[in-house]
């Protein structure tokens, strides 16, 4: 204690730069449909998803956004904690990003919405945590450009950590292998505290060969292999081992070669999985949440509502990540959709 105190007095910059030893890896597996993940689990072909289940809390009956089952709108919900559309009869509650193509450089969520749309990157970064985004679709550039040194909000929380909310941005279009190689290199060298990782593979295979096809299942198995590498990296990291939470969900499921019909359970039923210190093993996430969330049944599709009766949604992930970082703050504008 005395030695550490003296060190900090002699080198006060350490106080400012020492990141808290806590890490959250927030994963999205694009197009991962619970039915097919379960099929692989039953066949013993997804050992790392099995580890995530056996050691963590999970549900295969979570929900996407109510109105949209496509990639960018749902990822924006994961990162901002907002519904896509305005809800609760209140203007300005949604993040309002409804398109799914790669936007022109410089396009921001804020310009589209007409107001600043804060994210988990904002809250983590403003509180002194380092952040990273690893993606495998070009369209994720909208997040880099929304939260860069020009378009990110001023940091008015404690020390000024700047407007650029994403410290490490890596994006390889439709190449999760290169993306994930960069992830492993960077996380071994200097892990970011809040890290969002996006795997495109099941979605890409589903569009090309249909959801549930051999190619689709192989793509899920490939993600499982990368999860294994992720577990090994965490276990081998003096910083991350024992201090890391994994949050895993999907942006949507799919059927045939698509997933755009938002009223189809094949598209809106997804998984939510949590793993990390003090998360009980092999536990149903709805049971763990108690009365905070309500299992909607196999095909239930509750619209957003304030109060009780809400399913667990992929849009809960951002605020869940902040809580697992030890922050009490939620994402500004996230409107109580978080209950995990
Ligand atoms: Zn897709």
Image (tube, rainbow, N blue to C red):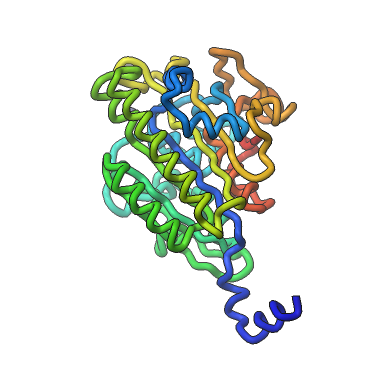
Residue at the image point whose x is 61% and y is 17% from the top: 296
Q: How many labels does the image show?
A: 0
Percent x, y of residue 211: 34, 19
Q: In the image as oriented, which residue stretches furthest toward the left?
A: 208
Image quadrant holding the C terminus, namely top right
Q: Which corner quadrant of the figure contains ligand 1?
A: top left
Question: In the rendered image of this protein, does residue 54 appear above or below residue 131?
Answer: above
Q: Which of 246 and 146 is in front in this view?
A: 246
Q: In the image as oriented, which residue stretches furthest toward the bottom?
A: 10
Percent x, y of residue 140: 35, 45
Q: Is residue 126 left or right of residue 105?
A: right
Res. 242 in view:
yes
Q: Answer with the quarter of the image where residue 136 lies.
A: top left
Residue at the image point whose x is 32% and y is 54% from the top: 106
Residue at the image point whose x is 58% and y is 37% from the top: 274
Residue at the image point whose x is 67% and y is 30% from the top: 306
Res. 86 in view:
no
Q: Which of 198 and 81 is in front in this view?
A: 198
Q: Answer with the quarter of the image where residue 18 lies.
A: bottom right
Q: Answer with the quarter of the image where residue 9 lies.
A: bottom right
Percent x, y of residue 68: 43, 27
Image quadrant holding the N terminus, namely bottom right
Q: Nearer the viewer, residue 265 or 182?
A: 182
Percent x, y of residue 338: 62, 37
Q: Nearer the viewer, residue 199 or 161?
A: 199
């Amino acid at each position: 204690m005395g030695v550490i105190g003296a060190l900090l007095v002699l080198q006060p910059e350490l106080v400012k730069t020492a990141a808290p030893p806590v890490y959250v890896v927030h994963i999205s597996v694009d197009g991962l449909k619970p039915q097919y993940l379960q099929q692989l689990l039953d066949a013993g072909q997804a050992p790392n998803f099995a580890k995530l289940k056996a050691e963590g809390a999970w549900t295969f009956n979570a929900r996407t956004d109510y109105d949209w089952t496509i990639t960018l709108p749902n990822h924006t919900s994961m990162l901002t904690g907002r519904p896509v559309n305005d809800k609760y009869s209140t203007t300005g509650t949604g993040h309002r990003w409804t398109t799914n193509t790669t936007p022109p450089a410089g396009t921001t969520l804020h310009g589209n919405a007409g107001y600043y749309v804060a994210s988990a990157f904002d809250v983590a970064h403003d509180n002194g945590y380092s952040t990273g985004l690893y993606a495998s679709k070009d369209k994720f550039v909208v997040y880099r450009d929304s939260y860069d040194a020009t378009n990110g909000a001023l940091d008015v929380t404690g020390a000024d950590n700047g407007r650029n909310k994403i410290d490490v941005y890596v994006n390889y279009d439709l190449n999760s292998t290169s993306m994930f190689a960069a992830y492993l290199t960077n996380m071994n060298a200097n892990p970011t505290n809040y890290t969002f990782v996006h795997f495109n593979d099941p979605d890409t295979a589903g569009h090309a060969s249909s959801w549930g096809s051999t190619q689709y299942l192989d793509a899920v198995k490939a993600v499982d292999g990368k999860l294994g590498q992720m577990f090994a990296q965490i276990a081998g990291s003096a910083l991350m081992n024992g201090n890391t939470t994994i949050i895993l969900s999907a942006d949507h499921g799919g059927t045939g070669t698509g997933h755009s019909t938002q009223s189809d359970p094949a598209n809106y039923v997804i998984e939510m999985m949590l793993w990390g210190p003090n998360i009980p093993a092999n536990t149903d996430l709805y049971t763990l949440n108690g009365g905070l969330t309500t299992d909607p049944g196999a095909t239930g599709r509750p619209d957003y509502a304030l109060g009780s009766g809400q399913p667990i949604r992929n849009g809960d992930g951002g605020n869940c990540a902040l809580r697992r970082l030890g922050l009490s703050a939620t994402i500004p504008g996230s409107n109580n959709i978080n209950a995990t």
